[in-house]
Amino acid sequence: MNSKVNDKRKPGFLAPEVALATFGVRTFGCQMNKSRSEHLAYRLRELGFSQAEKLENADVVIFNTCAVREHAAQRAMGIIGQFAREHKERNPHSLLVVCGCLGQLQREKLLEKCKEIDVLAGTHNWEDLPFLIQRAWWEKEKIVAFRETPPSLYEEKGYWHSNRISAYLPITFGCDNFCSYCVVPYTTGRQRSKPVEIIEEEVKNLADNGFREITLLGQNVNSYGRDWGREEAFEDLLSDIEKWLRGKKIWLRFLTSHPRDLRRGIVEVVKYSDCICPYFHLPLQAGSNKILHLMNRGYTRENYLDKVNLIRQSISGARVGTDIIVGFPGETDSDFQETLEVVKEAQFDVAYTYIYSPRPGTGASLLKDDIPLEVKKERLHILNDILRGIYQKKLPRLEGKIVEVLIDQKEGDLVSGRTANNLRVYLREAHALEIGEWVEVLLTPGEENKVYGSVER
């Protein structure tokens, strides 16, 4: 494994020792990052690497990082540093690779805090990364690679999916929105949409290989095709996928929708579809028009509520999820109360809530972070209590309904799955069920915040 290869190499050439090298990937952050890790795993397997069963046993350890939130970024940095030191002691000849948004945003800090890093690459070098890893493994040299500009095209394909039931399929990469709190446009570049031909190939391949559901991904999935000057390309893509999947039992989901770009045409396609799931993740972020303007979100609370009402009035049983940030600079008690009012009116089915933290290089980082941490924590607590109350009031209304559930998890003796509208259901006395199976379920009284059901025979 330590031998030097002196002959001239070309990209894709396999040295004998590469086949002996194993890799492992730990992913931080969003579904897009998980999908990128699956693409990287696919490419490394093409180059002759094999995947280790456990990260600590891998010859090549890869950390695919996220930089969206400060707390998560600092935690990731600590985990990488500790793991690197311990792993290098166990396996001195191993390779430590750090990639993703945190690498792009804070390369100098990473190199300073973690001397054990062997390969550090930015998001714009993603397609080169497998060859950089291959080269570093052959040559035992440290590689730091950052392209200043992102690729002009997004033609990524090939994924080693972590399970054979549900698959992520990115259709765009990058973002044009420049929300003032968000680093994504700076770490990924402007939006690039994947060609329809590649999406068709991937969708048909997933369907032919027995996958039960596909989730289309994008930082702003419903602006697909806008970089080509096509404002309604996402509706057309959904309609195309409906045709490609006709006659197959498979569910189609998509994440994440920007409220500004959710159009009636998208809702109509979902309404009349046989395979597109009626769940819309629609990040609110704040319910105050003043704060929404400071966030550069491009809509008002009134616009937002109109979109939620459009979904609920158009599609019976549709569910709506959201993201909310508390403690944005300048958020007064009155602004926070406006957020609570929107939450009560929207009656969200799913919500992810966060405390604001400034991110370097963003517009909001120029604003004074003037909300004390204790106030932010208190607001988060109040918000979560209200969201929990909304959810608990909805639970009794579900009892007695018969729904279709796709089984996707086994936790000890407990089996669970999701409905098309993204409700997780835990099944009683369902030990014989297999992951990937669709079943009709009668919803029964729940425990705490869990929805339970029994299989209809």
Image: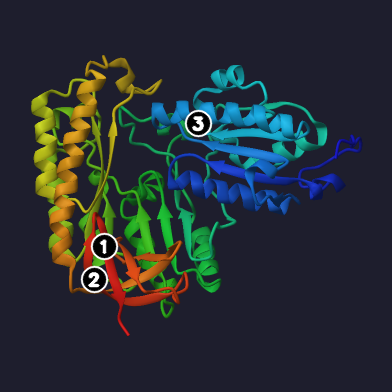
Where is residue 327 shown, x and y percent of the image?
22, 26
Q: For this view, does 381 lie left or right of residue 232?
A: left
Q: Which residue in the protein does label 3 denote? A: 76
Where is residue 167 shown, x and y percent of the image?
48, 60
Q: Amino acid at mark 2?
A: Leu
Between circles 3 and 2, the one closer to the viewer is: 2
Q: Is residue 436 above or below residue 311?
A: below
Distance, label 3 to label 1, CA atoms, is: 33 Å
Where is residue 96 shown, x and y percent of the image?
67, 33
Q: Earlier in the sequence, mark 1 or mark 2?
A: 2
**Is any atom of residue 278 visible in this view?**
no
Q: For this view, does 127 lie left or right of residue 179?
A: right
Q: Residues at badges 1 and 2 in contact (C-beta under 8 Å)?
A: yes
Q: Residues at badges 3 and 1 in contact (C-beta under 8 Å)?
A: no
Mark 1, residues whose alpha carbon is within 10 Å: few (<14), some, or many (≥20)? Answer: many
Q: Identify the secondary structure beneath mark 3.
A: helix
Which residue is found at the position 68% from the left and 45% from the top?
A: 23
Q: Which residue in the protein does label 2 denote? A: 443
Q: Which residue in the protein does label 1 denote? A: 451
**Is any atom of residue 50 visible in this view?**
yes
Q: Earlier in the sequence, mark 3 or mark 2?
A: 3
Q: Is residue 105 above or below residue 301?
A: above
Distance, label 1 to label 2, CA atoms, is: 7 Å
Given residues 405 and 195, the one toward you in this image is: 405
Which numbered tag is attached to residue 346? none
